[in-house]
Amino acid sequence: MNKRILPAYPLFVNNPYFSIWSGSDELNTSDTMFWNGLIKKTYGVVYADGKSYCFLGKREDCVSLKQTNVSVSLFKTDYEFECDDFILNISFISPTLLTDLDLMSRPVCYLKYNFVLKKRVSTLKIYLMLHQTHCYNKMDDYVIGGCFPFEKYETAFFGLNRQHPMSHTGDSFAADWGYTYVAGKKSFFTSANAISSFIKSGEMKYEYNDANEEKYIASVDSYENVAGFVEGKFLVAFDDLCSIYYFGEWIKGYYFRNGITIYDAINEAYNDFDETMDKLSAFESIVQKDLEKYDDNYKLLCYAAFRQSIAAHALVENKDKELLFLSKECHSNGCIATVDITYPSMPLYLLYNPELVNGMLRPIFKFAKMPIWKFPFAPHDAGTFPYCLGQTYGLYCNELENDKYLSNMFQRNRWNGIMVSHPMIHQYPSHMNIYNFDSQMPIEECSNMLIAAYSSIYFGADSSTVKENYDLLKLWSNYLIEKGLVPTNQLCTDDFHERVDKNVNLSIKSLQAIKCFALLAKSLGQEEDYLYASNSLEKMNNEFKEMFKNLEHLPLSYYGDKDSYSLKYNLAFDNILKTNLFSDELKNNELNHYLSKNQHFGVPLDNRSDLTKTDWILYICSLTDNRKIQKTLYGGIVNFLKESTCRVPFSDLYHVNDGIIKDFQNRPVQGAIFILLLKDKAKKIN
């Protein structure tokens, strides 16, 4: 029996440009899609003794296999189908293994299959077919392709004839460059007409008659006179040719850093399948042990978040051998290495590979030292994916389009869908004034960087990156000491309705961040800085406690309506890092108030609207060890996954009254789901 589990199911996901999903509970009732909803047609067909059955993608020219089950786990999405002649089990496997960076960054995914035959079958064939929509976001040239034989398999590929790697940037876009591959025992680059002929006859062939005819790549595994059990696999791969521009350096993906090619990747993936499955199984056993005391709902949230969060990043290594783990702010504004993406997403990475958090921080440190960045606080981002070229958030943009000096050099495309390529901000002369101060996030980003930097070391990352950038961290801590207690009216990650002047939650974050810097300074032997930060923090925290000492719960803002509220998710790392800035009584009072506001799809972010955020709900779950309270709070997110009418990858921003999303989808912030496991790990650290 099929049960709705997720709004969209991950099939082949590896990075922000290699991300294929199904938006249906039954795999053969709709076309597959890119993470943003763009159709990327993919078909799976079985030919058995003269009959064609479709199990993947929607086709009208063959019988749809009856789907009997679907399930998800960390690395796999599994389906079961059945007809009179056989049972077919399909697994879509993305080896996003955090503890093996070569495997994680190898841009190859698997479709594993097995047949349980109910009778002997004379001819059994299984096909995986990818339509040319996999080659582009918006087609502007014809598609070329071909096929190569290897010892145990063949691989076919296709892509646009004229390749313009990294030719545009922006938010909700697929790549208009690169080559997509499929591998099986036999493979073809062929035409739509040949695909239709195959459905009727069961025979696939190479056919290229018309340059304007739609193209496919396909792989087929064939078996003759079989009974009992039959199994095999297909591979799907994507070579983006170049992954990241990093402040003047063009970088291929981490897997390709030593001259390895996509054909090496496919060959390795085809031949080390069993070894790869063993690695995934071993890691999954670790996670299952971590999850033993949690219910099925929390496990589902972890499964829904794991591949999505990882695959919304690109992993590369620069010429200085520095690891860079670069998020894409998917379906928000497309920024790269966004600091307020790092803060919510980092529990997953602190838990299983904290060095990846260092990889998130490095581009921000690098840009903050450049002359064009003149502020005494941390940047918001390092560019727009896939370009690290300087912060592209909070630019004057077209606000001054008639200005002699700025003209129209910056284009934001969050809403208009126009593809752009930002100019090289990191090269701009230092005297240029390109940033609008009113659009910056001073306290938010300083705090995020300080908390993330200390947390990375706390959970075992190498400390050299933090040491090299200590002066910046000190600068940002001093900024918070001066301005963080009662924040002025400024942007932060609570502003989905409107800005909050004197935001209490932002004040909490600044106090936590100063504490993190103090501990960091102490660990590095900077006694004077430690004492200054600690003494300043003590005064600030006393003022904070005095301000709110007689209230049943913390309000939205200083001096505002005492009946107002907001999710004080920034209390989370006080528990995680055991810094004890805020009392258990305060946290329990907060939780009790949130429970009084809980609805079917969760607790609203604050009293101003019905919007909520999944990452912040999990952060507030970490304020208690009470399983009943945790289950109640994250239960609304599970309801959202199973009931929302928005069939897109796991959104973190939606309305609690109807489960309708607002903008965001496929975002890396879902790494926050793992914060309860991170808290468990932290308890074991002295």
Image: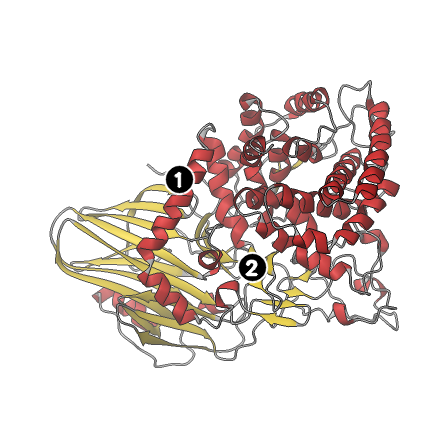
Q: Amino acid at mark 2?
A: Ala
- Earlier-in-chain disc, 1 versus 2: 1
Q: Is residue 664 above or below residue 401?
A: above
State the residue at coordinates (83%, 64%): 434
Whether residue 427 is visible: yes
Quadrant of the snapshot with the C terminus: top right
What percent of the width, then of the height, locates residue 41?
Answer: 42, 61
Quadrant of the snapshot with the N terminus: top left
Residue placed most toward the observer, 508 or 681: 681
**Which residue is denoted by mark 2 in the rendering?**
314
Q: Is residue 590 left or right of residue 166?
A: right
What percent of the width, then of the height, locates residue 128?
Answer: 33, 61
Label 2 SS: strand
Whether residue 488 is visible: no
**Which residue is denoted by mark 1 in the rendering?**
285
Q: Residue 513 falls in which quadrant of the image?
A: top right
Total numbered labels placed on residues in the image: 2
Dot 1 crowding, Cα within 10 Å, few <14, some 14–19, many 20+: few
Residue placed most toward the observer, 425 or 156: 425
Query: Quick check: marks 1 and 2 in contact, CB under 8 Å?
Result: no
Q: Residue 659 falls in which quadrant of the image?
A: top right
Residue 554 is labelled as: none
Q: Residue 626 falls in which quadrant of the image?
A: top right
Question: Label 1 vs label 2: CA separation?
Answer: 26 Å
